[in-house]
Image (cartoon, rainbow, N blue to C red):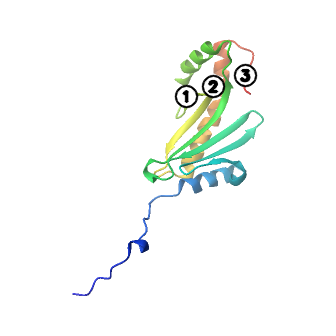
Amino acid sequence: MAKVKKFTSANIRKITGGKDPIRLVQEFILRLGFDPETCQKEKTGDAIRWMISLAEDEDLEVLIEGTRNHSETTVYMGINVATVPVRGGAEMLAAALEIADGLVGIKVSLVGHYLVLSATLGASGLSLEEIEYHYKLITAQRSWFREALLDELQWEEIPIE
């Protein structure tokens, strides 16, 4: 038998499968027409956050969490749809929960004092097309959600600040 060559552990690297979620999100941001470097707001050892100003009152947040462990990495994206006011806040939240039943593929959440339409995706096996698809789901349903909220509350306008 031939001799088996032994390798030092420093020469053996772990190769993870799939595409890098950070590069996918950066490509997504580039396709939206923005620079990922200037949109990046926060980077820690385990998370990266981008804020993309799509319109005057519309910011898209994209967050990758769990970057150290590829099997647990998630990609979150969300857009603020309304500010929950102090007066009438309970009615607004109740109406938002009723309307949320009609959302397809996304969810509504209360983040701070904002109602947010969002999607959370597991990064394992994630493709650029899936990111774009969920972004389109969010943006397509944003105006419907706001109009339904106005109708339900019988308000003139939805506060967004």
Q: Could you tell me if the residues under marks 1 and 2 are in contact, i.e. CB atoms within 8 Å?
A: yes
Mark 3, mark 1: which one is toward the viewer?
3
Crowding at dot 1, Cα within 10 Å, few <14 / some 14-19 / many 20+, comes out as: some
The amino acid type found where label 3 is placed reads Pro
The amino acid type found where label 2 is placed reads Phe
Q: Could you tell me if the residues under marks 3 and 1 are in contact, i.e. CB atoms within 8 Å?
A: no
Crowding at dot 2, Cα within 10 Å, few <14 / some 14-19 / many 20+, comes out as: many
How far apart, in angstroms, are the residues tagged by discs 1 and 2?
8 Å
Q: Position of residue 74 (x, y in %)?
A: 50, 45
**Quadrant of image for the N terminus:** bottom left
Q: Could you tell me if the residues under marks 3 and 2 are in contact, i.e. CB atoms within 8 Å?
A: no
How far apart, in angstroms, are the residues tagged by discs 3 and 2?
13 Å
Mark 3, mark 2: which one is toward the viewer?
3
Secondary structure of the residue carrying tag 1 is loop
* Label located before the other in sequence (3 or 1): 1
| Residue picked out by circle 2 | 145
Q: Position of residue 39 (x, y in %)?
A: 70, 48
| Residue picked out by circle 3 | 159
- Residue 41, numbered label: none
Secondary structure of the residue carrying tag 3 is loop
Q: Is residue 7 above or below residue 71?
A: below
The quadrant holding residue 91 is top right
The amino acid type found where label 1 is placed reads Leu
- Seen from the viewer's position, the closer of residues 28 and 43 is 43
The quadrant holding residue 52 is top right
* Label located before the other in sequence (3 or 2): 2
Q: Is residue 4 above or below residue 126?
A: below
| Residue picked out by circle 1 | 103
Q: Position of residue 32 (x, y in %)?
A: 69, 48
Crowding at dot 3, Cα within 10 Å, few <14 / some 14-19 / many 20+, comes out as: few
